[in-house]
Image (cartoon, rainbow, N blue to C red):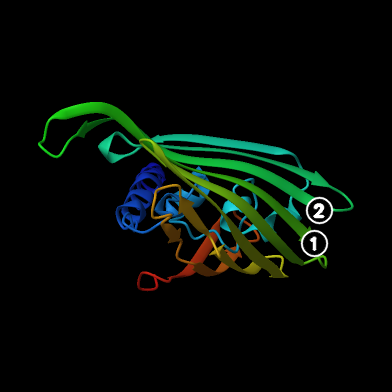
Amino acid sequence: MKKIIIVITLLTFIIPGIIRSQEDGGSPGAFLRLGIGSRALGMGQAFTAISNDASAAYWNPAGLGGLKMMEFMGSYSILSMERQHNYIGFIMPFKSVGTFGLSWINLGVSEIEGRDGFGQVTDMFSNAETAISLSWGYPIFESLYVGVTAKYLSHSLENYRSTGLGFDAGILYKVVDIFSLGASVKDISSSVKWDTPSSTQEKFPMVTRLGGAYHHPKIPLIVGLDYVMNQNQKAT
């Protein structure tokens, strides 16, 4: 039994690392696809049909509709190249209008050494990407939930800045007590526009997730499976 616990614990740390190593770092809005929440990351991000804690606002906002208690969640991660990935989330259920969530996601690095065209060191600068999201989930029926998220996006790089908006949507259906299905579409029309002379606009790739989850009726076991389609990558 101890060996099984050790293996599960190791996989909890290893699987998120494998997923993160495959991130599309060169694509706009990549910081929004790193994932959040220790449970969801520990399950290899197969969380679309589960989404039963505060991180549902990120994975599938429809899951908020099934939550009955106020929750707070946060994380701080140090990534490669001295980057910092931060997350804070808060949800509040209301009986008549559903559950609302507010979250903040940030990825940044500071003290970047600037250089001019001749290779000489100039001032130090920073790079930071941020998303502030307002989410809502509601039970249409006892076993069917829907949800949406609106996001304010910003990116600052040295003396320049870009801002924009984005949207997510999701649906969650509990077929029976032990089996659920979920779907979400992230970054619908998400983009940022820079305040540079060229007014460059960056459009975020839309990500569609389809998931299923099995909840064992007698032991504390959940099995999740997600199919993820990113506009800029092969499906996984």
Q: Which residue is mark 2?
A: 98
Numbered label tally: 2
Q: Position of residue 32 (x, y in %)?
A: 47, 52
Q: Residue at x 77, y 50 (%)?
A: 99
Q: CA distance from mark 2 to mark 1?
A: 7 Å
Q: Quadrant of the N terminus?
A: top left
**Residue extending furthest front?**
197
Q: Nearer the viewer, residue 167 or 70?
A: 167
Q: Could you say whether the residue bearing mark 1 is in a helix, strand or loop?
A: strand
Q: Residue at x 37, y 44 (%)?
A: 13
Q: Which residue is mark 1?
A: 139
Q: Quadrant of the C terminus?
A: bottom left
Position of residue 231 relative to residue 40, above or below, is below
Q: Nearer the viewer, residue 199 or 177?
A: 199
Q: Residue at x 67, y 66 (%)?
A: 172
Q: Are marks 2 and 1 in contact (CB under 8 Å)?
A: yes
Position of residue 14 relative to residue 203, above or below, is above
Is residue 110 among the parts visible in the rendering?
Answer: no
Q: Could you say whether the residue bearing mark 2 is in a helix, strand or loop?
A: strand
Q: Residue at x 73, y 56 (%)?
A: 137
Q: Position of residue 197 (x, y in %)?
A: 39, 50
**Residue extending furthest right?**
96
Q: Nearer the viewer, residue 140 or 68?
A: 140
Position of residue 236 relative to residue 44, above or below, is below
Tell me which numbered mark, 2 or 1, is placed earlier along the sequence: 2
User: Amino acid under label 2?
Assistant: Gly
Disc number at residue 210?
none
User: Amino acid under label 1?
Assistant: Pro
